[in-house]
Every structure is written in C-alpha cells, then in structure tokens.
Image (cartoon, grey):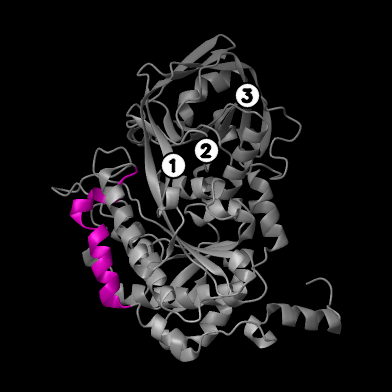
Amino acid sequence: MHRRLSLLSACAAFVAAAPLAAQGGPRQPSATAVRAAVETITEADFRRRLAVIADDSMRGRATPSPELEKTAAYIADAFRRFGLRPAGDSGTFIQRYPIQRTQPDSASALVATGNGVEVRWALGTDLAPIEGGLPDGFAGAPVVLMAGLPANDDRPFGDVDVRGAVIVQVLPLSAQSQQGRLLGAVAKAAAAGARAWVLLFNLPARFIAARARDALAPQYEVPGLAGLIPMPLLLMRDSSAADVLRAAGEDLLALRDTALHAVRPLRGVTMSVHGGSRVAERTSAPNVVGILEGSDPRLKNEFVVVSGHMDHVGVAGGGEGCAAQGADSICNGADDDGSGTIGVVELAQAFAQLRPRPLRSIIFLTVSGEERGLWGSAWYVAHPERPLARTVADLHMDMIGRNWRDSIAVVGKEHSTIGAAVDRVNAAHPELGMRLVDDPWHGQFYMQSDHYSFARGGVPAIFLFNGVHNELHTPKDEMGLIDAEKAARIVRMAFYLTLDVANTAAAPAWDPAARQRIVQGAH
C-alpha cells in the first residue's frame, strides 16, 4: 500500500475481516460438524457420479442435445435429494435460455474493394470465424488497419474513428499469448460501433482451411445475449490480403514487425458483406440452480455461487470441434468439465448436511454452453435467480481431475480478497496434501471459463484449474485417466474455501486496478 494505516483504521480493518462468531453473531459449526460434512466428499462418490455424466451414453453433452438434458436432470435430482431449494424457472431447478440455429449462405463472403483491386474472401474457405459468423450484410464500410497490439490499451485506436468500420489487424503469432489485451480492444471497438474484426496471421493455408471448414455448417447462438466477444471476430491468412494492402501503400512484411504499433485508415479501401444466414430452428438449453439458505438473518440475503459447466463438445461432426480418434467418436469430457460439475454436486451434498448452515446463502450452479462461448453463465449473470448486486463471489471449478497430484491453480486469485481466503485455507489444512497455488500461466486462461461471466458482471471470481493436457477436447478425455482421489481432495479444499467466504463478515472486495480492467473494461 502507498499509505500507512493509522492504528485506528488498522483495528477497524481487522474487526471487519473477522468471522462473525468472534463478534457475538450467529453460532458457527463446530470442528466436528465441519469434519463430518467434509468427509462426505469421497473418492468413491466422485468416481461414481462422474462415471454417469462422462459415460459414452451421454455422447459428450453437447449444447443443445438430449444428453445435456439428461445430465441436467441428473444434477437437479441430486439437488432435490439433498434438500436444496429450487431456483430455476417456475419453481424447478432448471433455468432455460433460448438458442437459435442459423444456416449460413454458402455464397457468403467478405469483399474488399479499392485502389483498382477487388478481393473476395469466402466464408468457409478463406475466412474462419473465431466468434460469430459474418455480420449482417453491409456495403462500403471503411477499413481501419491495426498493426501489432495497441500502444495504449485504454485508447487502442488513438484518434482514429472506428464507427461503422471493419478493423483489419496484422499480428505476429507471438501476440496470441496476450489475448486479454486483444479482446479488450475488440470490446472497445464494438462499443464504438465497429462492424467486424479480421485477424491476419502469417499462418499456413492448410491451417486456415482446417479452421474454416465448419464455417458453413449450422451455427448456434443465443439471441439477445452479448457474447464473450461482442462482435464478429474472423481469422484469415495475412498473405491473402497482400494485394489489398499493397494497393493501399502498405508493406505486409513491415506490418509483421513484432515491435510495430500502428492504427490508421486503410486508404481507399472499403469492405462489403455478401450473403448472410437464415434461422433454421429455435430451441433452448438448461442451467441447473439450487440454493442452500444461510443461517444469518441478514447475511442470508447475500450469495456465494459455486459453479461448474456440465456441457462438453459432443461427438465428431457435431459442430463443436470434436474429432474422432480411430473408432472413438465421442468426446466424453470427463475432466472438461465433468470433474468440476461433480465437484459442485459433492459440495452441495456436504453443505446440505452442515449444521448450523453457513451465514451467507450458497447457490450451486451448473451451466451449459461454456464450450460455445460461456452461454449459460452469461445468461445467468444477465438473468440472475437472485440479485447479482447481492452475489458476493463466484467460486468456479473447471478441470480438476488430472495433472498435478498435490496442487490446483487458483486463476484470478490476485484480483480480489478471495486471495486472502485462499491463503487462510492453505495454512489451515495441510492434512489434505493439496495446495491452492497462484496462477502459473499469468492470466492466459482467465477469460476461458464461466467465472469470467461473473467477473465481467462485477462479482469477484476465481476458478480452480489443473491446466490443459493432450486429451483436451478429444475422445481420450475419459474416466480411465481421471484421478478421483486427488479430485476429492481438491473438492474438500473448495469446501473450506467456500465456507470461509460464506462465513467471513466482510464480503470479498476487488483489487481496484483489476476491477477497472475487468469490469469497467467489459462495458
């Protein structure tokens, strides 16, 4: 801190952070009661439940699919048996959100014209959508060229007006590791009225073709929901734009310079969209929401969310990126995120038997559509079953069944005082042989799971994550590779962390700089 606290304010801060039981408040559970609740979280239970939702019969739990519905019903039934209060639609545990399936026009293309040159980039051949398809048809949009990453993240376009423009960005491959800065600029462009963003990388044509081949397959979207990336984001090989750039007086080799930061109108060039898409089907998908009411008359109106995503990428050919390996065409998603989903179920069972209950209420939430762009969590944040302003934290689990035996990363720990709770739990429970460790990837994965929807909505959030592995999004992510004993220890640590947050007088508070970057930066 830049300023030293006075003795008086230091004492006040200590009192505010103390558990309420130390201030004569409602009784907290005994060590014996806590231990009995924790001991319901077992390797055998974890393995048994995960085997249900990661079985081949669940066909990878795609969003939407009958198998995802079966998974949601299985979790809702467990919540009902535990005695949770339903907090979904019409007195049920299920919260539904709308989905529509669109069929892109096979002739869809982005066309650049100007300076005596016209180039047509076909969707599904030259263009690979990263988020969304081509925007609604338009003609004569100005083009803004960006080289490298922004020099100033607060004003990524400087004095250049991007309203109504297509932004074309030439990036070195090394810049992919700074996706947070890139997506922050995309969000600002969308807010300023830009139409689309085209990323140009120096990539092999076969790579672009592999990414583009599913672009003309039916696409799913949630109508009216602002996505993680709030505008169409398209990928293209930079050399395919060389003629247009050259005609505008730009040198592609110079633009690839990793040290270059430049933003300027692409002189004399406009872009148009040809084609479009039609709505082919309207359907919906489930979240599962159950509440355990807190024991404190005042704090029970504040909520700690414990979450995991129950969907995965389905089967080969289903449009979510699953590819067959030999005769196996089902991407079971045992680790991603069957493991975190069952972690939520195990926590719900443990907390349901704890007496007295935690001071704050706990919302147990399993969402869908994560693999398609954080759909379910974004829908919940936009349509919370309890006021978002009274939601004090989201503790998320995504992939907790693989890799390290003795530790699990806490992504986002540094962004709020949840980090202090993590440190307290680590110090208090060495008997579990499990450490909650700082993010070793320095934010690389922060935007890639459902806690981020809560963070963008202003709720301090972390997620427990064991890192990626070679089986991710393949048919090899199966039960046989899951370390259920380790996962059970992680869930026990998550129990203690949730109990700490639910029972500490002061609600988690953002680090001001992180809040400015994550919350204000999302709007």
Q: Magenta segment: does it hold 55?
A: yes
Whole-Å distance between the Cαs marked 3 and 1? 31 Å
Tell me the SS state at disc 3: loop
Q: Which residues are magenta?
A: 42-63
Q: Nearer the viewer, mark 3 or mark 2?
A: 2
Tell me the SS state at disc 2: loop
Q: Which residue is mark 3?
A: 165
Q: Residues within 10 Å of mark 3 (few under 14, many from 20)?
A: many
Q: Nearer the viewer, mark 1 or mark 2?
A: 1
Q: Is residue 368 visible?
A: no
Classify the position of the C terminus by image quarter: top right
Q: Residues within 10 Å of mark 2 (few under 14, many from 20)?
A: some
Pointers 3 and 1 in contact (CB under 8 A)?
Answer: no
Give the vertical position of 77 relative to 109 (above or below): below
Pointers 1 and 2 in contact (CB under 8 A)?
Answer: yes
Q: Which residue is mark 1?
A: 97
The majority secondary structure of the magenta stretch comes to helix
> Is 196 on the left-hand or right-hand side of 483?
right
Q: Earlier in the sequence, mark 3 or mark 2?
A: 3
Give the vertical position of 282 relative to 113 (above or below): below
Residue 36 x %, y %? 39, 85
> Along the line of sight, which residue is nearer the eye, 228 or 293?
293
Q: Magenta segment: does it hold 249?
A: no
Label at residue 56? none
The residue under the point 56% across, 54% down is 454
Q: Which residue is mark 2?
A: 225
Tell me the SS state at disc 1: strand
The residue under the point 67% across, 73% down is 506
Residue 59 x %, y %? 23, 49
> Along the line of sight, which residue is nearer the eye, 479 or 298?
298
